[in-house]
Image (tube, helix red, strand yellow):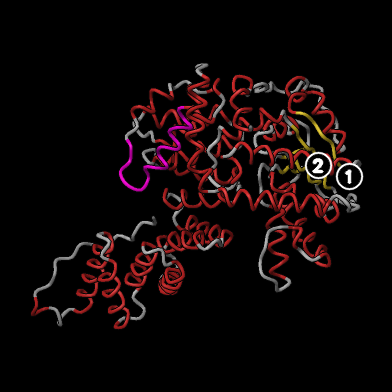
Amino acid sequence: MPEHRPIPSIRAPAAAAETADPLRDAATQVHLAEELRQQKKFDRARKLCETLLARYPGYYAAQFTLGLIFIDRQQYSLALDALVRALMFEPQSWQALNALGAVYMKLGAHEMAAQTLERAARIKPDEPTVLIALGEVYRDELDFERAREAFRKAYALDDSIAVAGLGLGRCCAALGFYEEAAQVLERLMERGMGSISVLGELAELPRQVVSVDVEAALARIPRPAGENQASFASIAAFVRAAALDRRGRHREAWEQLVEANRGERDARQQEAAAMAHMEQQNLAQLRPRRLTVAGDASGPKSLFILGASRSGKTTVEALVSTLPGIKPGYENPIVENAVRRTFLAAGLPPARRFEMLPLPLDEQCRAFYRQDLARRAGPARVFTNTSPALIHDVARIAAAFPGARFLFIKRDVDDTMFRIFSRLYLAGNAYSYDLRAIRKHVAWYHEMIDMFAGKLPEVARVVAYEDVVSDPAAVVSQAAALCGLPVPSEPPPHVADDRGCSHPYRQWIAAALG
C-alpha cells in the first residue's frame, strides 16, 4: 500500500476560531479523513475529502487522500481519476506517483506503472517504498535484472523491510544466482524476518546452496489469522515436502505434495481443461502448415530457449551465455510487448498472442520488436529468451523476425512432471496441480518441439536435459553453431545434476495416473 504523505497533527481549533482560520480547519479535516481511512471508515473519510474539494478544488492533500480511499476500496478507476487530479496540483509528489503506479498495476497497465514509478524514483531516489513498487512492476513483467537492481537498492537503504529482501531473493533465484538468493533469504531468517513466503523460496533453491533447516524453521513460523490460512497451509505443505525429500523420507514427502496440490487442483480444474483444449487446437492447426523463415538481417539475433516448465531452460541459458556475444534475456516479454503495441497502433483491441495478429501487420510488429531488441541486447550479437509460452508463437516468430533461432529442450517426462508437481507457482500454470493435466501438457509441449524441429531445420535444434548434464560442452557447441558464434576454448561451468529426481516417487506417480 502506498504511503500517505505526512500531514502534521493539528489541534482542533476552538469553535469560535473555526471561521477565523478556514485554511487551518481544512488541514485538520484532511488529517481526520486520513485517520478515518486508516480505521477503514471509508464513507466518512470520502465525504470529508469531497466536501473539502468542493470548497477548494485544487487541494492536493484532499485529492490524494481520496485516491488512497479508492485504492483501499479496490475502486481503481476512481482512484486513477483522483490521483491524476492530485498530480495536476502537485506534479512533483512522489507519494502520489507511487500510489498511481500501484493503480496502473491493478488495471494491467504495466508500462505506465513502470514509467510512473521511474518518475517517482527520480524525484525521491532514496525512498525504499518507491523502489520496492518499481521492483514489483519489473518482476511482474519478467524483467528480473531491473527488478533485482530495484530491490537491491531498497534493501540497501533499509534492510529491515522484509519484502525488499524477499523480492531480491526471488529475482536472484529467477536469474539463476542461487547462492546469492540463499544468502539473502537466510539472512532474513537469521534476523527474525522469516515468513512462509521466505521458506517457500528457500525450498525451491538447489539443496546444496541452502544451509538452514527448512523443516525446523517452518515449525517456528506463526500461522497468520484470517484470510491467509489456506495460502499458508498450501505453501507450508510444499515447503515440508521439499524438506522431507531432501532427507530421503519420500513417502511422507509425496503425501505432503498431494495435500499441497489438492486445493489448487480443484479450484483450477476448469482453467486447466480450457488450456489443454487450446493447446490441442493450436497443435492441430500447425501440423498441416508449411512454415517459413525470415532469414537474417543486421543487428542482434534472437535465441529462443524453449521447453516445458522445469525442463532445464535456465541451466541451458546459463551455459550458452558463456559464449562470447550472448546476453541472457531470461523470461523477458519482448515478443508480447511488440505484439501488443502492434495491435494498438492498428486501432485494434489489445492482445499479446502473436497468432492472433493479422498477417499484414507483421512488418509493423517486426519494427517494434527490432527496436526493443536493439535496446535490450546492446552490443551483444545474440539475445536469449526463455519464456515457455512462446512455444505457441514459434511459427510467426520464425516468419516475422529476422535472425530468430530456436534451441528446444526436452527432459525425461517423469522427472519433468515431478518437478512441476513439486512447485507452487505464483501465477499461471493451471495444469500444474494435477498429474494427469501435467502429463498432457508435457506431452503436448514435446509434440510441438518435434513438429517445429522438423519444419524449421535450418534455425532449430533440440537438446535433451540429460545430455546437457552429461556433456555441457557439446550443448554449448551446438548453440554456437546455431548462432554463428565461435566456441570458447575454456570448458563450460559445472551443471547441477537433477536427473532421476522422480525415481523414488514413480510408483505413486503411476498409481495417480491410473
Task: Answer with the quarter of the image where residue 205 lies.
Answer: top right
**Label for residue 406?**
2
Position above or below: 478 against 272 = above
Instruction: Give the residue at x 68% y 62%.
Output: 340
In the rendered structure, find residue 456 and report the number of the disc placed on it: 1
Q: Residues within 10 Å of mark 1 (few under 14, many from 20)?
A: some
Q: Measured from the top left, where is residue 248 in percent x and y?
A: 52, 16
- Expressed as whole percent of the image width and height from the top left, the position of residue 333 reads 66, 51
Residue drawn at x 39%, y 55% as measured from the top left? 1
- Given residues 422 and 269, the one toward you in this image is 269
Distance between the alpha carbons at the discs numbered 1 and 2: 9 Å
Can residue 192 be found in the magenta stretch?
A: no
Please report contact status of discs 1 and 2: CB closer than 8 Å, yes or no: yes
- The three-letter amino acid code for the residue at tag 1 is Leu
- Amino acid type at circle 2 is Phe
Q: Magenta residues: mostly which secondary structure?
A: helix
Element under disc 1: loop
Q: Is residue 151 left or right of residue 1?
A: right
Answer whether residue 413 is visible to the viewer in this image: yes
Q: Where is residue 327 in the image (x, y as percent from the top left)?
A: 72, 40
Position of the C terminus by quadrant: top right
In magenta, the rendered stretch is: 223-240
Q: In which quarter of the image is residue 360?
A: bottom right
